[in-house]
Amino acid sequence: MSTRTARPVARTLAAVLIFQVGIGVLLVLGDIRSAPFSLPFSSPQAPRLSEPVRPGDQRRTFNPSRDRPTVQPSRDPGELPDRLTLTYEDATWRLEGAIEDGDAQRLMPQITAADPKIETLVLQSPGGSVRDAIDLGRHLRASGIATTVLSGEICYSACPYLFAGGTTRTAEPSASIGVHQHYFGESTILPAFVAVEDIQRGQAEVMTYLDDMGVDVRVMSHALATPSNEIYILLPEELERYGFTTPET
């Protein structure tokens, strides 16, 4: 290989190496930001989830495996199931736990076959699969099921899309409902900018769904501005303004 030919090849290899190193740095920084500790040179972008939420100060750090709100300390909702689970106790149907891939197909037959028939479904989830939340939400709407979130309990990340599927939607005064950015690609290794097409398609799917459910898509401005390791807590007046909660009849 001549010296003239070798130089472009070397430049190309160097560019690939720099790109790969850049990806590694971004991944490490992402891990540091979501770690449960702080390095001397780093500081969290938002307070802990336990800090009270006030208008204009609604972003909180959020790690679903660690963080739980203390919106009503007198009520202990207990440990959430590792995976979305439908239960019936004290004449109340509840859907709780993390939303995993495949949960929609697994749970839709259970919801349809529920006895007694589900009229209102209590939700509590730290979030998870957006597509499964949307599929379940559409199933709830088609089945004529209302949704609610109780005081002291949470509905974060993808859970608000499940909540939006209710024919009527209520949130008790101390319920905690929040949104943030989502990742829509198949890979969980590459950073988000590598999957721009997946992200754009996923966001379009979410916005279409929210519009179909009667929720103002402007709520996505808060979701898109909040990193995935933080959560934007929607105030009761925002839940009403964006149409997440429905007027009492």
Image: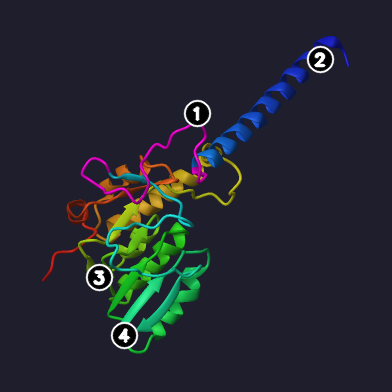
Label at residue 167: 3
Q: Earlier in the sequence, mark 1 or mark 2?
A: 2
Extreme residue in the right direction: 1
SS for callout 4 = loop
Question: Residue 157's x, y, as percent?
Answer: 39, 54
Position of 97 relative to 244 (above/below):
below
Position of 48 relative to 64 (above/below):
above
Label at residue 90: 4
Q: Earlier in the sequence, mark 3 or mark 4?
A: 4
SS for callout 1 = loop
User: Marks 3 and 2: which is nearer the front?
Assistant: 3
- Specify the amino acid type for callout 3: Thr
User: In front here: 188 or 194?
Assistant: 188
For the residues labelled 2 and 4, the Cα–Cα distance comes to 77 Å
Label at residue 5: 2
User: In front here: 3 or 249?
Assistant: 249
Q: Is residue 11 left or right of residue 187?
A: right
For the residues labelled 1 and 2, the Cα–Cα distance comes to 44 Å
Q: Which residue is mark 1?
A: 41
Q: Is residue 235 left or right of residue 12?
A: left
Position of 170 relative to 1 (above/below):
below
SS for callout 2 = helix
- Specify the amino acid type for callout 4: Asp
Label 2 neighbour load within 10 Å: few <14, some 14-19, many 20+: few
- Residue range of the region highlighted in magenta in the rendering: 34-57
For the residues labelled 3 and 4, the Cα–Cα distance comes to 22 Å
Is the Cβ of the residue at disc 1 closer than 8 Å to that at disc 2?
A: no
